[in-house]
Image (cartoon, helix red, strand yellow):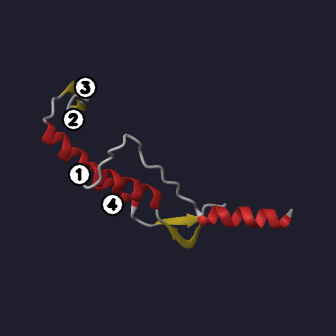
């Protein structure tokens, strides 16, 4: 893994133990979950807040799945990954209203 030094900005290699790497990955996934769970204001086409908020639910779910794998709670035994499709209901509503106007 490459790591930038603060003073020079140069990169150098640092070898991590398996435990250090595991801790780093878990901390990073935990941070992703915390950031993605924060509400994000919905903006109109002019960039003004509408008063509604959205959550990055797909990011949270994927990070939770990765966290479970890292913690050993989920194991993929057949070699096939799990495919999950997240559907945005807001996009589906737009599609329906566009179809009605045709």
Mark 2 is surrounded, within 10 Å at the Cα level, by few (under 14), some (14 to 19) or many (20 or more) other residues, namely few
Residue 56 at least partly seen: no
Circles 3 and 1: CB distance less than 8 Å? no
Which residue is found at the position 74% from the left and 65% from the top? Answer: 96
Which residue is found at the position 21% from the left and 35% from the top? Answer: 6
Residue 81 at least partly seen: yes
Q: Which residue is mark 3?
A: 10
Which residue is found at the position 22% from the left and 28% from the top? Answer: 8
Q: Which residue is mark 4?
A: 34
| Residue 97 drawn above or below residue 26 | below
Which residue is found at the position 33% from the left and 50% from the top? Answer: 66
* Marking on residue 72: 1
**Quarter holding the C terminus?**
bottom right
Between the residue at mark 3 and the residue at mark 2, the CA separation in whole angstroms equals 8 Å
Whichever of callouts 3 and 4 sits on the residue coming sooner in the sequence is 3
Label 4 or label 1, whichever lies nearer to me, is 1
- Residue 24 is situated, as x and y percent measured from the top left of the image, at 21, 45
* Marking on residue 6: 2
Circles 4 and 1: CB distance less than 8 Å? no
Residue sitting nearer the eye, 66 or 90: 66
Between the residue at mark 3 and the residue at mark 4, the CA separation in whole angstroms equals 30 Å
- Left or right of 31 on screen, residue 81: right
Dot 2 lies on which element?
loop
Between the residue at mark 4 and the residue at mark 2, the CA separation in whole angstroms equals 26 Å
Whichever of callouts 4 and 2 sits on the residue coming sooner in the sequence is 2
Between the residue at mark 4 and the residue at mark 1, the CA separation in whole angstroms equals 21 Å
Whichever of callouts 3 and 1 sits on the residue coming sooner in the sequence is 3
Between the residue at mark 1 and the residue at mark 2, the CA separation in whole angstroms equals 34 Å
Dot 1 lies on which element?
loop
Dot 3 lies on which element?
loop
């Amino acid at each position: 893994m490459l790591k930038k030094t603060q003073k020079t900005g140069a990169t150098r290699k640092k070898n991590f133990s398996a435990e250090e790497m595991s801790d780093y990955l878990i901390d990073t996934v935990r941070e992703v979950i915390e950031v993605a769970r924060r509400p994000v204001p919905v903006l109109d086409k002019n960039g003004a807040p509408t008063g509604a908020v959205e959550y990055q639910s797909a990011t949270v779910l994927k990070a939770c799945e990765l966290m479970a794998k890292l913690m050993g709670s989920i194991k993929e035994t057949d070699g096939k990954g799990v495919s999950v499709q997240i559907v945005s209901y807001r996009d589906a509503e737009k599609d329906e209203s566009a179809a009605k106007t045709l």
